[in-house]
Amino acid sequence: MTYEAVIGLEVHVQIKTRSKMFTRVPAGYGEPENTLTDPTVLALPGALPVMNRAAVDAIIKAGLMLGCEIAPVCKWDRKNYFYPDSPKNYQISQYDRPICVGGAVEIELPGPARNIMGEHKSIPLTRIHLEEDVGKLNHGAGGSLIDYNRAGTPLMEIVSEPAIHSAEEAYAYLTSVRNSMLYAGISDCDMEKGQMRCDANISIRPVGSTALGTKVELKNLNSISFVRDGIAHEVARQIAVVKAGGTIVQETRDYDGLTGTSQSLRSKEMAHDYRYFPDPDLMPVKVDAEWKARLAAELPERPFDKQRRFMAAAPEGYGLPYTLASVLIPDRALADWFETAVKAAGPALAQPVGNWIANDLLRELSASGTALADAKVTPAALAELVKLIDAGTLLQNAAKEVFADMFATGEAPAAIVARKGLAVAQTDTGELEQWCRDAIAANAKAAAEFKAGKESAINGLKGPVMKAAKGKVNPKLVDETLRRVLAAM
């Protein structure tokens, strides 16, 4: 019997705000342990929560980015559980009336080759709700220590329908969610800092069946790659158990990404175990049309919408190949940098601009450890370089040298070309024609093949002409002159 996986993901994303969810104490990462606390975070007697409006703005934006319905009224609930990382012994969350309902995450599956766009599909969402994060347990040989710096940080939980059917789909889903949150400035989504975390609910069923199997929750998936690997491991484990005549037990398992193994942690809790009830200290939140419209106007273009536009033909888009669009799109700042450069260079030069960014700018940034925002070369300078090449003033090989100087010094390309004497020489037409005749005479076979219809044969004539010109003549002019001389023969 063949089985298919049925996977639902619960993605927790920390919202980037200056203060925590229900108090003015700063939110942040990397501070000394237990310094980002106050009576509200520590649940001291008499401390009362006050809602962070900026966090509610952010989750509404997240919902709009993912096509959710924004509830006109949502409320706060207490999720009760006893664990050292929760100072109050409950978590303020949203249970039956979340702020975002429905929606979907568009994903792109790997293509048949790296340079070919894969299939796009939508993974439906159940909800997105807002809550407060908990503290962090630091385990050591002598015991565990609690750091409450993270406790109270605004946290949204994005819950998918059980509509993911492979580890690769889960990887694409998380990548898409991360890109959307980064584009909208909602979160930095750094999984190493706990700003994005994921739990996976995994079950299997016979192919063709519509019934859901017994699900297992997989935790400790602290990188997107570990999510993919952990799901693949759990699906294989469940199939092996069933084929051996065993039964899947509903439980929570811990996945170790370094060893590729998992172990049982506890039996899976149900909703009633948390004894949800409305928080008596917080009022419901009403979201009117004006509030939603204001936030919708602040949203950026969605990543996949931008990809489609970049690949569309002019005048709607730039006509970029998938290989270029797939490099530019994941980083909003890089995509914006590209569009600024294209605006200066002109839409007709969009692909050369993209090639310079993908092949040269990113290489130099990586080699030097420089962030894009700190690069000395500007979009306008790259546009100027590309226009010099297009005008025939600068040859491609010389342009590489010019770009290296631009990146290192920030000097304008025209100034570098003038200082180094790299401009293409203004060749006398008669002299160029003579070099072409000499090349044709010395390479009669290539000339004959070209005249017989073999287009590529002209390349065997260009080399000798460029050599005679010492590389300082426009290749386009060489091509045109060779064709004219050959046609007259």
Image: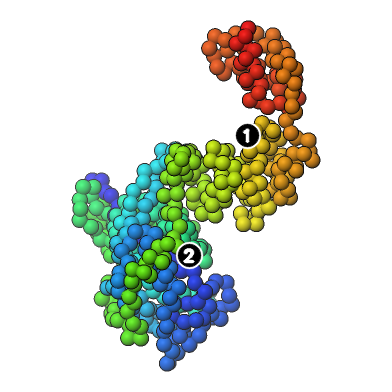
Residue that lies at the very extreme toward the bottom in this rendered image: 46
**Residue 359 position in % (x across, y down):** 59, 42
Question: In terms of image quadrants, where is residue 260?
Answer: bottom left
Question: In terms of image quadrants, where is residue 428?
Answer: top right
Sequence order check, earlier mark of 2 and 1: 2
Q: Quadrant of the C terminus?
A: top right
Where 370 sits versus 280, above or below? Answer: above
Q: Is residue 354 left or right of residue 98?
A: right
Tag nearer the camera, 2 or 1? 1
Dot 2: element: loop
The residue labelled by disc 1 is 390
Where 263 sits versus 152, above or below? Answer: above
In space, the residues marked 2 and 1 are separated at their CA atoms by: 40 Å
* Amino acid, disc 2: Ser
Q: Residue at position x 23%, y 47% from top?
A: 207
**Residue 353 position in % (x across, y down):** 58, 41
The residue labelled by disc 2 is 187
Q: Could you say which is closer to the camera, residue 158 or residue 18?
A: 18
Q: Residue at position x 45%, y 85% from top?
A: 40
**Residue 280 position in % (x across, y down):** 32, 86
Dot 1: element: helix
Neighbor class of circle 1 (other Cα within 10 Å; few <14, some 14-19, many 20+) is some
Q: Residue at position x 63%, y 39% from top?
A: 386
**Residue 422 position in % (x across, y down):** 75, 35
